Amino acid sequence: GVSEATARRDVALLSRQGLIERAHGGAVPRRARRSSGFPEPPILERTTLMVEEKRRIGALAGRYVDDGDTIIVNGGTTTEHLIPHLLERQGLTVITNALNIATLLRAYPSITVILLGGVLHHSSFSLVGLLGEDALANLRADKLFAGIPAIHTGYGLSNDDMAEAQMDRAIMAAAREVTILADHSKFGRVAIVRVAPIKQVHRVITDDKTPADQLAALREQGILVEVA
Protein backbone atom coordinates (compact mmCIF):
# COMPACT_ATOMS: atom_id res chain seq x y z
CA GLY A 1 0.00 0.00 0.00
CA VAL A 2 2.93 2.38 -0.48
CA SER A 3 4.37 4.07 -3.53
CA GLU A 4 7.39 2.69 -5.37
CA ALA A 5 9.39 5.75 -4.31
CA THR A 6 8.59 5.11 -0.63
CA ALA A 7 9.56 1.45 -0.96
CA ARG A 8 12.88 2.41 -2.55
CA ARG A 9 13.62 4.89 0.26
CA ASP A 10 12.79 2.29 2.90
CA VAL A 11 15.03 -0.30 1.24
CA ALA A 12 17.87 2.22 1.04
CA LEU A 13 17.45 3.12 4.73
CA LEU A 14 17.39 -0.53 5.87
CA SER A 15 20.48 -1.21 3.77
CA ARG A 16 22.37 1.70 5.38
CA GLN A 17 21.38 0.39 8.81
CA GLY A 18 22.85 -3.00 7.93
CA LEU A 19 19.57 -4.87 8.34
CA ILE A 20 19.25 -6.08 4.73
CA GLU A 21 21.40 -6.80 1.70
CA ARG A 22 20.21 -5.26 -1.55
CA ALA A 23 19.83 -7.65 -4.47
CA HIS A 24 18.62 -7.44 -8.04
CA GLY A 25 14.90 -6.70 -7.94
CA GLY A 26 14.69 -6.27 -4.19
CA ALA A 27 16.47 -7.16 -0.95
CA VAL A 28 17.02 -10.04 1.45
CA PRO A 29 17.61 -10.13 5.23
CA ARG A 30 21.24 -9.63 6.09
CA ARG A 31 22.95 -12.98 6.55
CA ALA A 32 22.43 -14.49 9.97
CA ARG A 33 26.18 -14.56 10.60
CA ARG A 34 26.07 -10.80 11.16
CA SER A 35 23.93 -11.19 14.25
CA SER A 36 24.36 -14.79 15.39
CA GLY A 37 27.85 -14.95 16.81
CA PHE A 38 29.96 -15.74 13.76
CA PRO A 39 32.73 -16.60 13.50
CA GLU A 40 32.38 -19.45 15.97
CA PRO A 41 34.36 -19.17 19.21
CA PRO A 42 37.35 -21.48 19.74
CA ILE A 43 36.59 -25.11 20.54
CA LEU A 44 37.67 -24.80 24.18
CA GLU A 45 34.96 -22.18 24.71
CA ARG A 46 32.32 -24.25 22.93
CA THR A 47 32.87 -27.34 25.10
CA THR A 48 30.75 -25.75 27.85
CA LEU A 49 27.81 -24.86 25.58
CA MET A 50 24.71 -27.05 25.09
CA VAL A 51 26.47 -29.93 26.86
CA GLU A 52 23.36 -31.96 27.71
CA GLU A 53 21.93 -31.54 24.22
CA LYS A 54 25.23 -32.67 22.68
CA ARG A 55 25.37 -35.72 24.95
CA ARG A 56 21.92 -36.83 23.84
CA ILE A 57 22.76 -36.22 20.18
CA GLY A 58 25.97 -38.23 20.48
CA ALA A 59 24.20 -41.14 22.17
CA LEU A 60 21.53 -41.28 19.48
CA ALA A 61 24.13 -41.05 16.71
CA GLY A 62 25.93 -44.05 18.17
CA ARG A 63 22.97 -46.27 17.28
CA TYR A 64 23.74 -45.76 13.60
CA VAL A 65 27.26 -47.18 13.84
CA ASP A 66 27.45 -50.90 13.11
CA ASP A 67 30.15 -53.52 13.64
CA GLY A 68 32.65 -53.47 10.80
CA ASP A 69 31.84 -49.91 9.71
CA THR A 70 34.38 -47.44 8.42
CA ILE A 71 33.21 -44.02 9.55
CA ILE A 72 34.46 -40.46 9.31
CA VAL A 73 34.09 -38.14 12.30
CA ASN A 74 35.00 -34.51 11.76
CA GLY A 75 35.98 -31.98 14.40
CA GLY A 76 33.79 -30.09 16.80
CA THR A 77 32.29 -30.37 20.24
CA THR A 78 29.14 -32.24 19.24
CA THR A 79 30.91 -35.08 17.45
CA GLU A 80 33.05 -35.62 20.58
CA HIS A 81 29.97 -37.01 22.30
CA LEU A 82 29.65 -39.79 19.73
CA ILE A 83 33.00 -41.33 20.69
CA PRO A 84 32.02 -42.98 24.04
CA HIS A 85 29.28 -44.89 22.20
CA LEU A 86 31.74 -46.60 19.85
CA LEU A 87 33.44 -48.73 22.50
CA GLU A 88 31.27 -51.82 22.03
CA ARG A 89 31.58 -51.89 18.24
CA GLN A 90 33.69 -54.63 16.68
CA GLY A 91 35.98 -54.15 13.68
CA LEU A 92 35.42 -50.39 13.57
CA THR A 93 37.64 -47.95 11.67
CA VAL A 94 37.41 -44.21 12.31
CA ILE A 95 38.85 -41.61 9.94
CA THR A 96 39.21 -38.11 11.35
CA ASN A 97 40.90 -34.78 10.69
CA ALA A 98 40.43 -33.64 14.30
CA LEU A 99 42.99 -33.87 17.08
CA ASN A 100 40.33 -33.81 19.79
CA ILE A 101 38.57 -36.81 18.22
CA ALA A 102 41.83 -38.73 17.76
CA THR A 103 42.81 -37.99 21.36
CA LEU A 104 39.55 -39.42 22.68
CA LEU A 105 39.96 -42.52 20.49
CA ARG A 106 43.41 -43.25 21.92
CA ALA A 107 41.63 -44.94 24.85
CA TYR A 108 40.00 -47.50 22.51
CA PRO A 109 42.79 -49.74 21.12
CA SER A 110 40.19 -52.01 19.49
CA ILE A 111 39.28 -49.18 17.07
CA THR A 112 41.53 -48.52 14.08
CA VAL A 113 42.12 -44.77 13.80
CA ILE A 114 43.22 -43.04 10.59
CA LEU A 115 44.32 -39.46 11.28
CA LEU A 116 44.33 -37.26 8.20
CA GLY A 117 47.23 -34.89 7.71
CA GLY A 118 47.20 -31.18 7.06
CA VAL A 119 47.77 -27.77 8.56
CA LEU A 120 46.58 -27.37 12.15
CA HIS A 121 43.66 -25.00 12.58
CA HIS A 122 44.46 -23.92 16.13
CA SER A 123 41.04 -22.71 17.26
CA SER A 124 39.22 -25.89 16.19
CA PHE A 125 41.96 -28.55 16.66
CA SER A 126 41.27 -29.62 13.06
CA LEU A 127 43.74 -30.42 10.29
CA VAL A 128 42.91 -28.78 6.97
CA GLY A 129 44.44 -28.37 3.53
CA LEU A 130 45.69 -30.36 0.56
CA LEU A 131 47.39 -33.15 2.51
CA GLY A 132 44.13 -34.25 4.07
CA GLU A 133 42.08 -33.61 0.94
CA ASP A 134 44.45 -35.74 -1.16
CA ALA A 135 44.25 -38.56 1.39
CA LEU A 136 40.45 -38.45 1.33
CA ALA A 137 40.46 -38.83 -2.44
CA ASN A 138 41.87 -42.34 -1.86
CA LEU A 139 39.62 -43.30 1.06
CA ARG A 140 36.02 -44.45 1.21
CA ALA A 141 33.81 -44.58 4.28
CA ASP A 142 30.42 -46.09 4.97
CA LYS A 143 29.20 -43.18 7.05
CA LEU A 144 30.10 -39.63 8.01
CA PHE A 145 29.13 -38.07 11.32
CA ALA A 146 29.75 -34.36 11.03
CA GLY A 147 29.26 -31.22 13.03
CA ILE A 148 28.63 -27.97 11.15
CA PRO A 149 28.44 -24.33 12.34
CA ALA A 150 25.44 -23.30 10.25
CA ILE A 151 22.42 -25.11 8.79
CA HIS A 152 19.83 -23.38 6.63
CA THR A 153 17.08 -25.49 5.08
CA GLY A 154 17.28 -23.45 1.88
CA TYR A 155 20.94 -22.45 1.63
CA GLY A 156 22.39 -25.67 3.03
CA LEU A 157 25.46 -26.24 5.21
CA SER A 158 27.98 -23.42 5.63
CA ASN A 159 31.08 -22.38 7.51
CA ASP A 160 32.83 -19.08 8.13
CA ASP A 161 36.30 -20.58 7.54
CA MET A 162 37.23 -21.29 3.91
CA ALA A 163 39.84 -23.95 4.68
CA GLU A 164 37.47 -25.86 6.97
CA ALA A 165 34.67 -25.58 4.42
CA GLN A 166 36.88 -27.06 1.70
CA MET A 167 37.95 -29.89 4.01
CA ASP A 168 34.33 -30.61 4.92
CA ARG A 169 33.46 -30.88 1.21
CA ALA A 170 36.23 -33.47 0.74
CA ILE A 171 35.06 -35.36 3.82
CA MET A 172 31.47 -35.47 2.59
CA ALA A 173 32.58 -36.70 -0.84
CA ALA A 174 34.37 -39.66 0.78
CA ALA A 175 31.30 -41.02 2.59
CA ARG A 176 28.32 -42.96 1.27
CA GLU A 177 25.99 -41.63 3.97
CA VAL A 178 26.09 -38.21 5.64
CA THR A 179 24.68 -37.64 9.12
CA ILE A 180 24.80 -34.14 10.59
CA LEU A 181 24.97 -33.75 14.37
CA ALA A 182 23.78 -30.30 15.39
CA ASP A 183 22.11 -28.71 18.39
CA HIS A 184 19.28 -26.21 17.93
CA SER A 185 21.58 -23.17 17.92
CA LYS A 186 23.01 -24.15 14.50
CA PHE A 187 19.70 -23.92 12.62
CA GLY A 188 18.55 -21.00 10.51
CA ARG A 189 22.12 -19.72 10.22
CA VAL A 190 24.13 -18.84 7.13
CA ALA A 191 27.91 -18.44 7.18
CA ILE A 192 30.17 -17.04 4.45
CA VAL A 193 31.14 -20.24 2.62
CA ARG A 194 28.61 -22.84 1.54
CA VAL A 195 29.88 -26.35 2.21
CA ALA A 196 27.08 -28.27 0.51
CA PRO A 197 23.40 -28.03 -0.42
CA ILE A 198 21.05 -29.60 2.06
CA LYS A 199 20.16 -32.40 -0.39
CA GLN A 200 23.60 -33.99 0.21
CA VAL A 201 22.57 -34.81 3.80
CA HIS A 202 20.92 -38.16 4.54
CA ARG A 203 20.13 -37.69 8.23
CA VAL A 204 20.09 -34.89 10.81
CA ILE A 205 20.27 -35.60 14.54
CA THR A 206 19.37 -32.67 16.76
CA ASP A 207 17.79 -31.84 20.11
CA ASP A 208 14.21 -31.14 21.13
CA LYS A 209 14.68 -27.35 21.13
CA THR A 210 15.10 -27.15 17.37
CA PRO A 211 12.04 -25.33 15.92
CA ALA A 212 9.39 -27.62 14.46
CA ASP A 213 9.25 -25.67 11.19
CA GLN A 214 12.97 -26.35 10.65
CA LEU A 215 12.49 -30.07 11.18
CA ALA A 216 9.45 -30.11 8.90
CA ALA A 217 11.39 -28.31 6.14
CA LEU A 218 14.14 -30.95 6.34
CA ARG A 219 11.66 -33.82 6.19
CA GLU A 220 9.91 -32.25 3.20
CA GLN A 221 13.23 -32.51 1.35
CA GLY A 222 13.52 -36.21 2.08
CA ILE A 223 16.03 -35.92 4.95
CA LEU A 224 15.67 -38.28 7.89
CA VAL A 225 15.36 -36.33 11.13
CA GLU A 226 16.03 -37.72 14.60
CA VAL A 227 15.37 -35.73 17.78
CA ALA A 228 17.40 -36.65 20.84
Image (cartoon, rainbow, N blue to C red):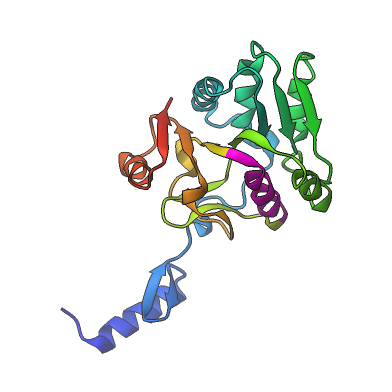
Give the camera-side residue of 33 and 168. 168
Give how far across and how far down residue 207 sits, in percent.
43, 30
What is the quadrant of residue 216 in the picture?
top left
Quadrant for the C terminus in the image: top left
| Residue 75 in view of the camera | no
Which x, y percent locates residue 13? 39, 78
Q: Locate residue 36, reporting x and y percent.
A: 50, 51
Is residue 92 on the magenta stretch? no
Kindly give the residue lying farthest to the left in the view shown. Answer: 1
The furthest residue to the top: 88
Residue placed at 26% from the left, 84% from the top?
Answer: 6
Residue 102 appears at what percent x and percent y?
77, 28
Quadrant containing the N terminus is bottom left
Q: Is residue 30 above or below residue 213?
A: below
Which residue is rendered at x = 65% and y = 22% of the image? 83
Reply above or below: 205 against 110.
below
Q: Is residue 33 left or right of residue 47?
A: left
Main SS, magenta region, reads helix
Residue shown at 62% from the left, 47% from the top? 40
Quarter of the image where one finds residue 72? top right
Please tell me which residue lies in front, 228 or 88. 88
Tell me where the magenta segment starts and ends, as one range. 163-176
The residue positioned farthest toward the bottom in the image shown: 5
Q: Is residue 166 magenta?
A: yes
135 or 215: nearer the eye?
Answer: 135
Relative to residue 107, is residue 40 drawn left or right? left
